[in-house]
Image (tube, grey):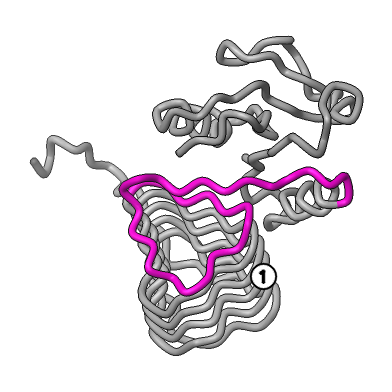
């Protein structure tokens, strides 16, 4: 049941924040405000809620009765989200998680601050650390372990017995072989198939589609 006593805010005013707000309202949560650094505020209202400056949180709220969803994506390989998380923890503000009702979460452990969207799957005996984002239909399969501050994009598939480090990005429709180790700050581009262990900050991308010159679509269909 939604907690009606705690004031709840969303950090961010990006598309991710909008989607999270939509899902939270649909789930019956009451969101008091959006929050962002003062330099990014262009309007005092967003989706019918006030926008407050992050720098003023301590003046506006009793932080001991405040919870915050971090709706910050993969900027700087998730370091932006990591920075905000640690700042909120220093201020003693509770970092909130969201799990969509259609998500299938069989994991042994899911850390705080995770956002788990529609039809995402965390398989049996899997584990996920803090502030991971699982977009719709993403999968962390059985016995796999994800560290902290990772981003799993739409329909990506991490196979069984895979270790994902920290601050990784797994792109749309990317897939992995089972049993591999994905090192910290690895970027796996959309549509990739990753079959090997990676080194820290490795970037893996597939061959890209190309435009067929001197033809148009109706030449074929």
Residue 115 lies in the magenta stretch: yes
The image shows a total of numbered marks equal to: 1
Position in image of residue 10 (x %, y %) = 65, 32
Above or below, 183 against 150 in this view is below
Position in image of residue 144 (x %, y %) = 46, 79
Q: Quadrant of the C terminus?
A: top left
Above or below, 214 against 200 in this view is above
- Of residues 104 and 65, the one nearer the viewer is 65
For the point 85% across and 23% down, the residue is: 38
For the point 76% across and 51% down, the residue is: 85
In the current view of this chain or complex, which residue is farthest to the front? 5
- The overriding secondary structure of the stretch rendered in magenta is loop
Q: Quadrant of the N terminus?
A: top left
Position in image of residue 42 (x %, y %) = 75, 14
Q: Is residue 3 visible?
A: yes
Q: Which residue is mark 1?
A: 166
Q: Is residue 59 left or right of residue 158?
A: right
Residue 28 lies in the magenta stretch: no
For the point 63% across and 75% down, the residue is: 165
Position in image of residue 142 (x %, y %) = 37, 79
- Please tell me in which quadrant of the rendered image residue 70 appears: top right
Circle 1 crowding by C-alpha within 10 Å: few under 14, some 14–19, many from 20: many
- Please tell me in which quadrant of the rendered image residue 220 appears: top left
Start and end of the magenta stretch?
Answer: 90-118
- Of residues 116 and 221, the one nearer the viewer is 116
């Amino acid at each position: 049941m939604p907690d009606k006593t705690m004031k709840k805010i969303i950090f961010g005013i990006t598309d991710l924040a909008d989607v999270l707000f939509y899902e939270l309202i649909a789930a019956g949560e009451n969101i008091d405000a959006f929050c962002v650094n003062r330099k990014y505020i262009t309007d005092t209202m967003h989706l019918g809620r006030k926008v407050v400056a992050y720098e003023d949180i301590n003046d506006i709220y009793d932080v001991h009765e405040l919870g915050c969803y971090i709706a910050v994506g993969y900027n700087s390989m998730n370091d932006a989200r990591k920075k905000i998380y640690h700042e909120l923890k220093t201020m003693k503000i509770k970092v909130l998680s969201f799990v969509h009702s259609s998500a299938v979460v069989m994991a042994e452990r899911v850390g705080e601050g995770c956002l788990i969207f529609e039809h995402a799957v965390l398989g049996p005996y899997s584990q996920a650390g803090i502030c991971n984002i699982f977009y719709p239909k993403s999968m962390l399969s059985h016995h796999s372990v994800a560290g902290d501050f990772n981003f799993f994009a739409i329909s990506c598939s991490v196979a069984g017995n895979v270790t994902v480090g920290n601050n990784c990005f797994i792109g749309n429709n990317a897939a992995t072989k089972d049993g591999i180790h994905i090192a910290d700050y690895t970027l796996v581009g959309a549509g990739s198939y990753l079959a090997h262990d990676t080194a820290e900050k490795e970037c893996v991308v597939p061959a890209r589609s190309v435009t067929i010159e001197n033809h148009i679509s109706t030449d074929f269909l």
